[in-house]
Amino acid sequence: MLVPAYELMFGKLARHSLFDDYLHSGGVDAQIVLKQLGGSHADLTATMSTNGGEAHFRWQRDLKDPNTFVDFLVSTSKPTMRLSSSIYYPKYRIGAFGTFPLNMANRACPEDYGVMGLRYGSENLSIGASFVPFPSPGEVPYGAWLVGRKGNLSAGVQYKPIGGSKHPMPFTDLKNWNCAIGYGVGSSSPLSPSFNFALELVRSSQVCYIYSLLVDMKASYCVLAGNSFRYFSQD
């Protein structure tokens, strides 16, 4: 609920899950999860590493509804104290969400006070927008997206303004827009066989990636951005 549907489509979620550990910066990590037996609505997760640690408390109204919750995060690696919440009405397919930093003494930009948003989501369509409580001129909304899917094809646009932009009409600046089209076959789970291809236009650069995941966890990933080309593989 807190992440725009545009960021979850086009194979991005599965690709991130595959390479998150592979490209990890290193170090020693340990994690402890505390949860009451018998289906508790609350849990506490503590993560410790050489860079610091964090504690994450989550309350969920219904175990079958992960979209209505309250999160509280405290981190020492990057001194952070953040409250996040979301509520969703399945009958109307409408939800609201918000993320609010609590310990920022020097708030330099409007999003330092928090980000709130509304969204509508169905099986084949997602539309939403996010706002800041105290926006600067020309910063309404803070972001927006529209994503649709028909069979194996998906397409979407995202309004994501550049931070600190002083453009008098931010909606007319093409650098504040992203668009993508994708084709996917198989499961959306990063642990199941799937194939995804997507072409995305990000601000003023072109990004083309191919994501492939087989049962034996072999994958290939290529990025074409301007004149650069990078290739990763995992056996």
Image (spheres, grey):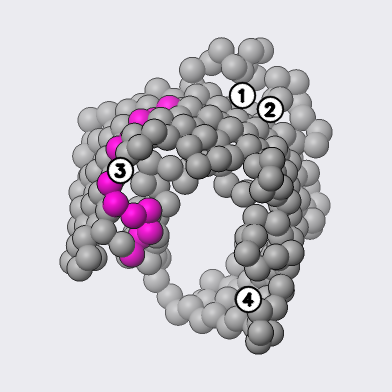
The residue located at (61%, 24%) in the rendering is: 165
The residue located at (50%, 42%) in the rendering is: 123
**Pointers 3 and 2 in contact (CB under 8 A)?**
no
**Magenta part of the chain:** 179-191
**Which is more foreground, mark 1 or mark 2?**
2
Packing grade of label 4 (10 A; few <14, some 14-19, many >=20) is some
Distance from disc 3 to disc 4, alpha carbons, whole Å, reads: 34 Å
Asked whether 55 or 95 is in front, the reply is 95
When the figure is inspected, residue 214 is found, relative to residue 174, above or below; the finding is: below
- The image shows residue 213 at horizontal and vertical percentages of 25, 57
Res. 141 mark? 2
Distance from disc 3 to disc 2, alpha carbons, whole Å, reads: 30 Å
Residue type at numbered disc 3: Gly
Residue type at numbered disc 4: Thr
Q: Secondary structure at mark 3?
A: strand
- The image shows residue 154 at horizontal and vertical percentages of 38, 34
Q: Which residue is mark 1?
A: 165
Residue type at numbered disc 2: Pro
- N-term-proximal mark, 1 vs 4: 4
Q: Which residue is mark 4?
A: 45
Packing grade of label 1 (10 A; few <14, some 14-19, many >=20) is few
Packing grade of label 3 (10 A; few <14, some 14-19, many >=20) is many
Q: Is residue 138 left or right of residue 16?
A: right
Residue type at numbered disc 1: Ser
When the figure is inspected, residue 98 is found, relative to residue 56, above or below; the finding is: above
Q: Which residue is mark 3?
A: 184
- The image shows residue 203 at horizontal and vertical percentages of 44, 25
Whether residue 82 is visible to the viewer of this picture, yes or no, is no
